Image (cartoon, rainbow, N blue to C red):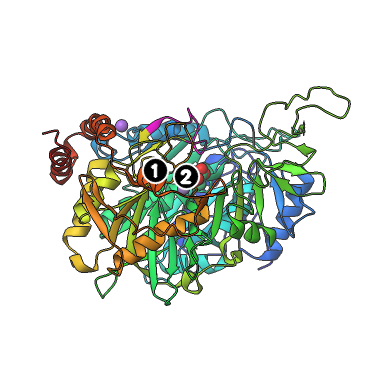
Amino acid sequence: RLPGQSFASNQPAGHPVPSSFAGPTSNEALLVWVAEVVALTTPNAVVWINGSDEEWAAMAARLVDAGTMIKLDAYPDSYYAASDPDDVARVEGRTFICSVDEKDAGPTNNWMEPAQMKEIMSDLYQGCMAGRTMYVVPFCMGPLDAADPKLGVEITDSEYVVGSMRIMTRVGDEALRLIESVDTFVKCLHSVGAPLAPGAADVTWPCSDTKYITQFPEERTIWSFGSGYGGNALLGKKCYSLRIASAMARDEGWLAEHMLILKLISPEGDVSYIAAAFPSACGKTNLAMLEPTVPGWKVEMLGDDISWMRFGGDGRLYATNPEFGLFGVAPGTGWHTNPNAMRTIEKGNTIFTNVARTDDGGVWWEGMTKQAPDHLIDWKGRDWTPSGVDAQGNTLESAGEPAAHPNSRFCTPITQCPMIAPEYNSPVGVPISAIVFGGRRKTTIPLVSQARDWQHGVFLGSTMGSETTAAATGQVGIVRRDPMAMLPFIGYDAGDYLNHWLEIGKHADQAKLPKIFYVNWFRRDAEGGFLWPGFGENSRVMKWIAERLSGKAAAVHTPIGLVPAVGALDIDGLEVDGRPMSTEQVKQALAVNVDEWKKEIPLIEEWFAFLGETLPSGMSDELAGLKTRLGLL
Ligand code: PEP
Ligand code: NA
Ligand code: MN
């Protein structure tokens, strides 16, 4: 088969639809489904994606011709895309868990009856690919040689999605060969929802004002309509690897989590694998690629967003990263904050979305360098200068706006990361020693604490709060509860999800379970300044965590858990604003302030009440215990 060979349908109206559709597979279920989607969406042509470089080169050239992508001179095989200004982030308000029973979607998800949703969306899909090419993208989440490979096929009418899926997952012939031999693959249907009338001119970023991001957990099916952006459209990512996979994991006894995976190596060569959950745009990519400032310590990266964890034969919890690429938030990523991400991007093969462009064919975003270049083209395609004024002194339309959208992204192959752990592609994964939860909180939550045991750790994860970011549409900076950073991604009832976490712990050998920690890099002092410098200095916290695991670091009990004993956190040589960090400031960063906790308790109570009757009793027990220790009961 030639790269990109198409199996043109060209069905004239009224032409009988074949019962199955020609394709490079003998999997009848797949062929029938493709035929059904062709009949429903009426594309001009159907192309099966084989995943070859030649195929992508030809497609990228067409996308550049069409104006959808701009080729960047500064990096090899790299492209820039600007989305529609109304299609820049995940749309949680338009995201649905269509379980058969409403109670199985729980209070944290939007729900609609599956049949009703299918009726609404089938109407939207009717003829929605007219004038466009339909792509069939076979993919595998996780290593191709896994014992139980998690397969999928995304049907999409977006070439941008094909190019991004190709980076983010293992796509093409190898995945299709696996699908050949199994019956179970997740059907992922995506359309930008913008049919083209004959002869009509296309826009560079087709999408629709009507958007639906729908998961059918029992059927293991995903239907997405109207958006071309990130997690709304790259269906292997959030929709499959978190929402659908969390339902699979509940049924099969494992965990599908919103977690980075890193390998921490001590100066003595001791290795700890750590998984860490943070809400979107709270520094997961930066932590995954940490460059320790503590002498002798090393970090290697295995994943920056999603972790699937299963018990191994030895009773330990093993993590794999289902993804194959990084879809990182660009703003804030720079040589001073995340040099490894910069090195990864520099190698090329990257698709940038909604960043700003430099005059020499490169990219820029807020936080890449301290000083912005003198002139940029902003993400909306307008001239932009740091002062907001052009050379003639005229105020620019872009004045006062950021050059890059706050949720602009780089999509780049994980294999290009210079500090990737050699075992990143292991089909069994790596044994996890510590799980870290973290949110973005100005107050209350100390820099680091350790859970007393698994149930207490699940409680810490369940009560996690974080200020909202630009990664989802809606107001930024308000604290919302985000259990395990999974609020937008739990594919079933949140109380049942917490119970599943408890069950995982109950059936394990307690000594082999990962220890659970809770961090907050974002605590501020009374003047609003950050109490902790973050970034590479977070290695000091990681060191304390590793030394807790090996029994070397001291901790003291507090009402909320174990915090570093005085002197246990290594602040040797740590400078803040050019001055050595004072022990007083460390104390503030680690403080358990009872007055702050008195304000926190009602918020947790309100959250638990919202979760309702499926909240496991273990969680209310933990809350009662916390109140007792704080002297509130
Ligand atoms: C997205 O927004 O599309 C996405 C993939 O992830 P996140 O929100 O976690 O950054
Ligand atoms: Na609901
Ligand atoms: Mn994420």
| Placement of 496 over or under 139, stated as above or below | above
Locate the N terminus and report the quarter of the image it occupies.
Answer: bottom right
Decide if residue 354 is on the left or right side of residue 238.
right
The residue under label 1 is 439
Disc ID at residue 123: none
| Placement of 24 over or under 400, stated as above or below | below
221 part of magenta stretch: no
The residue under label 2 is 282
Can you see residue 610? yes
Can you see residue 48? no
Q: Where's residue 298, x and y in %?
A: 49, 68
* Residue that lies at the very extreme toward the left in this rendered image: 633
User: Mark 2: which amino acid?
Assistant: Cys
- Give the prevailing secondary structure in the magenta stretch: loop
Q: Where's residue 568, x and y in %?
A: 34, 59
Q: Residues within 10 Å of mark 2 (few under 14, many from 20)?
A: many
Instruction: Please tell me which residue is depicted at 48% across the width and 29% down the height of the picture.
Output: 474
| Residue 488 quadrant | top left
* Residue that lies at the very extreme toward the bottom in this rendered image: 268
What are the residue bounds of the magenta stretch? 469-479
Q: Where's residue 514, x and y in %?
A: 28, 63
Q: Secondary structure at mark 1?
A: loop
Locate the C terminus and report the quarter of the image it occupies.
Answer: top left
Instruction: Check if mark 1's residue and mark 2's residue have beta carbons within 8 Å.
Output: yes
477 part of magenta stretch: yes
Q: Where's residue 355, x and y in %?
A: 67, 42
